[in-house]
Image (cartoon, coloured by chain):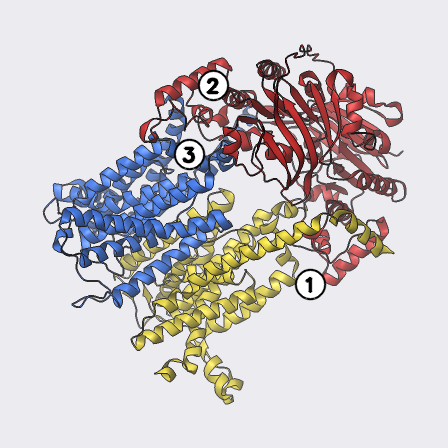
Amino acid sequence: MGESIIKLVGITKVFPGVVANDNVNLEIREGEIHAIVGENGAGKSTLMKIIYGLYQPTDGQIYIRGRLTNVTNPQVAIKNGIGMVHQHFMLVPSFTAAENLVLGSEPQKNGLFMDFDKAVKITKELSEKYGLYVDPYQKVEDLSVGIQQRIEILKVLYRGADILILDEPTAVLTPQESQELFAIMRRLVEDMGKTIIIITHKLQEVLEVSHRVSVMRRGKLVGTMDTRDATEQILAEMMVGKEVVFEKFHANQNIGEKLLEVRDLVVRDNRGFIAVDGVSFSIAAGEILGVAGVEGNGQTELVEALTGLRKLEEGSIFVKGRDMAKGSPSDFRRMGIAHIPEDRLKTGLAPEASVNENLMMGYQHKKPYEGLGMKLNKKAISQKTAQLIRQFDIRTPSGQTRVKSLSGGNMQKLVVAREFSFDSPILIIAQPTRGLDVGAIEFIHRLIIDMRDAGRAILLVSADLDEIFRLSDRIVTIYEGKLTGEFRTADVTKQEIGLYMTGKNLSTAG
Amino acid sequence: MKKLKLSQDLEYIFSLALSVILALIIGAIIILANGKSPFTAYAALINGALGSPYKIATTFAKTVPLILTGLATAVAFSSGIFNIGGEGQLYLGAFAAAYVGFTFTNLPGIAGIPLALIFAALAGGFYALVPALLKVKYGIDEVITTIMFNSIATLFTSYLANYPFASSVGKMGATEMIAPAYKLLRLVARSKLHTGIFYTALIALFIYYLMEKTSAGYDFKMIGSNPIFARYGGINAERNMVIAMIISGALCGIAGAFEVLGNHYRFLQAISPGYAFDGMLVSLIVKNNVLGVILMSIFFGMLKTGSIAMEYETAIPSELVLVIQSIIILFIAGEKGFANILRRIYAKEGAGQDV
Amino acid sequence: MYREIFNITLLQNTIRTATPLILAALGGLLTSHTGILNIGMEGMILLGAFFGVAGSYFFESYLMGILFAVASGIIIGLIFALFVIRLKSDEFIVGIAINMFAGGLTMFLLRSIFGVKGAFSSPRIQPLPDISISFLENIPVLNVLLNDHSLFVYVSWILVIAIYIFLYKTPYGLWFRAAGEFPEALDTVGISSNRIKFISSILCGIFCGFAGVHLSLGYLTLFTENMSANRGFIALAAIIFGAANPLMTYVAALIFGFFDALGIRLQGVGIPSQFTQMFPYIVTVLVLILVVKRERDKKRAHQARQKGLDKSQIKAADNLAK
């Protein structure tokens, strides 16, 4: 392993209200695969964007090959041989692979025209050289994600990068594709002398592919070590820390009748791919079913289907025995389904509207809130909203305050307050505590348990395994849109669930 | 009652005031460049708009189409559907009212006038329905279709007024006069203020009630604020957008009807000099707030009326107010951007002081 | 009567009436490629027409007329870009404001500078020259059709070709198209998509200035209030009709110009012209519906194929290597 090729000294990045990176010192050596791991929001991506010049650090220095460098924009990074493969591909859909590859540094002829033939030739040559085969003439919109990623990597190599930053590269790949990517990474490092930084939160991948690994938590770099000294347990501990040990909740004994049943559900995602693939399960009154899985394995689409927000391709959803296959969101709500969405700002709130306006959604057509001539009963509404604000401890200057000025925790409390106040027998809850502080997490967890004890049937989708384990009575694992296992929480360990979540033991799972 | 939202609203009212003042200053510079005193000019403008009952009446006469088309914009825009086709809807409404007025000549005013207004509202509403359906069924951008529909409607009514329904006497591009029973009463001698202002006030009250006091208004506003949230909350966004659009079109149609019944007493092929666009700008300036539309319409009406007096006294062409109005809307459109830039400059200076 | 209307002069007129549409549409299609719907073209044309006349009148030179029109185009393009891109204002609000601004400003200046209302003409205004192409003179039909047109008729033809080449054959064209479709792709390789959008807005202002100066110094030799007469919106229709491709937009503008010219002649013999004038707007709406339908069919076919796509493509790509 070689010299230090990138050195970060005291990098701090402050966004309004958030310290994304806190005094990070990191050294990348030439010719290594360096993994950076951490949970969502640990500051990995921000750090990489600073190296690539997309963000400017609030404080600290970047040394590239020993020289203090001010990376003011991506152009500077590119000039210094740094290339970044973004998590969301930066490709123009209607352009061909070759056009995307050369965009920004096009081969020219006669000093003015673009040399399309040369672009194709370059694409073929680079494909050949690195073993990353793509059809130069095909349009990106017709290509699969795996191929698109190849184009992204080639794009970076074409610009002469010898330090490659890969941001969550396996998030969108199938296991086979991930294996291919690892082979390519090894080849790039061993045969071509490149240096690779890979960001991920999958620990198995880290152990498999990297030479050294750095762990980040809450914006801080916790430590760097040789991968051969690391185990999953060590890394996991460093990632999560030991700060909070939540007390366990007592299990619920009163399981009632079956309220929600899903049979052979098939749902497509926005791009037309099958996202939920033949899922069946049921939930009874008084129980919480946890859905564990790495994000992007069909959870979003499953939740949208269960709340009427997404059309079903096949299969059926029974709410209290009634088939809801063609229901609208309001039909689902009328049948007694409430929904805490995964993205509160996008789906669960109107940020520009007031707290009261957000709280009354769903009440506006109900008595006594709506009177004769559709007139809103302001008094009844303000009583209701005031009661919810008090009951759910929403910290807001007033009911007239715009939601966008509340903190994340209070926004989420607002969503929870509204959805729990309907007395809906079925609750579909997605990522209920994402990005919240410990106090808010505890508060919301208790509310969910209270709802369970009150006899609600609850589906809980979360990327946070601790949360799943803490709240669920039963757990199903989801991988690539299929359920890979079903367990009683008491009978299973986190490690086991982790395996099912990542697609292992598929054959033996139910 | 609305304490804290008020502080955010105050911020907006402040930047609105600033925009108006800046636009007036730019206007003053133009007046200076013309070798005139801005003070004399603006004084003449204010006096011309409010200096006598006749002048006030004229100001309010000018606000009628502005309020109606402004409210039309407010209803549609706050529901997240962008009706730029008000001008076309206004023309169809105007023609429909004229048609009733010169066809059913035997009706008494008490039946005829409401009938003409209903026809106008139906014409405008139906014409707005088409782009609304194209939007919710096919996702076709309503901005483009309504722009196209404007030209189609003005051309179509121009055809009607020139050929099948052309006046047998006098003017080119005009229909027959409406029956006398349809003519709205003039309220102040010599001025054009007619009883339509009362109807307008009633309509404005209704729209205020609808948007601010009812669950329908709440649904509309939530769709405009975040359509994904509205759908998630169980509101049928598509149906509501279509309804909002029909209301919007109907209001524009009625605006057209008043031009016929209260002003020209017949349909003319160029009956509106872009009232719907003026109304749209009024509504945009006040962020589609119903009360704001009314106040801003009066302000614009003052500018229009006063500018004539200003021209008479200082020889500054009255079109100056068009320039001032468009500058106000530009500043308001850039409001957020300006604020961000100011905030960044301020933040930088703050950081500099720390060092 | 039939022959009075449908003859070679009609086609000759078509070329004349289509020219301002072509010029404005070329500008607008540049911004539409960079992702901006510019409905302020109407006002930009009007400003070009006015300042063209002003420049030509004061300097008694059509070149100064062009220069003034271009300058006004650059300034209004800059203002448009400043608000839409820098200040992130809504593009259609800014567009409407510019239309209103142009209408008001030109009327105001018409009265305060030239002291007239409605229209201004003067023998001092130098019109744009007609261009004679000598080799065409001996070819009977083409000579009438293509020869002796005003300067910008030929300029518009050259620009159609030039912009086609620019968009589809040069790196900058690639940047323009990327800036509209997926700006992040451009930003992450170190080219500012906002800068590209700025440039397209300014070019649009200049081209609309050309369209305006052609109207007031080429087509006619005077300025009248609102003389852009909806051409900005017809140009928008042509862009949509031609799917923002310069050649197809050119054809669309010619078709729309044809119906315009036809309408004028029909009116001359007492036949309603309104329906021919309506044509561009109606077909644009129809085209929009057709485009949506086609894209839906495409998406459906795409979904059907999608299932096996992933694996087969990797295989196919790998096979390519062998």
Q: Chain of mark 3?
A: B
* Badge 3 vs badge 1, beta-carbon distance below 8 Å: no
Q: Which residue is mark 3?
A: B219
Please check whether the numbered discs 2 and 1 fall on a single chain.
yes
Please check whether the numbered discs 3 and 2 fall on a single chain.
no
Residue neighbourhood size for the residue with mark 2, other residues' Cα within 10 Å, grouped as few (<14), some (14–19), many (≥20): some
Chain that appears red: A
Where residue A216 sits, quadrant-wise, is top right
Above or below A260: residue C242 = below
| Amino acid type of the residue that numbered disc 3 sits on in the rendered structure | Asp
Q: Dividing the image into 4 quarters, which one contains the C terminus of chain C?
A: bottom right
Q: Is residue B1 visible?
A: no
Chain that appears blue: B
**Which of disc 1 and disc 2 is earlier in sequence?**
1
Residue neighbourhood size for the residue with mark 1, other residues' Cα within 10 Å, grouped as few (<14), some (14–19), many (≥20): few
Of the pair C311 and B143, the residue shown nearer to us: C311
Q: Which residue is mark 1?
A: A111
Circle on res. A396: 2
Marks 3, 2: nearer the viewer: 3
| Amino acid type of the residue that numbered disc 2 sits on in the rendered structure | Thr
Q: CA distance from mark 3 to mark 2?
A: 24 Å
Chain that appears yellow: C
Q: CA distance from mark 2 to mark 1?
A: 62 Å
Q: Give the percent coordinates (x, y) of residue C87.
A: 48, 42
Of the pair B162 and A276, the residue shown nearer to us: A276
> Regarding mark 2 in the picture, which secondary structure is present there?
loop
Above or below C316: residue A48 = above
Q: Chain of mark 2?
A: A
Q: CA distance from mark 3 to mark 1?
A: 58 Å
Q: Give the percent coordinates (x, y) of residue A156.
A: 75, 46
Q: Residue at x 55, y 66 (%)?
A: C248
> Regarding mark 3 in the picture, which secondary structure is present there?
helix
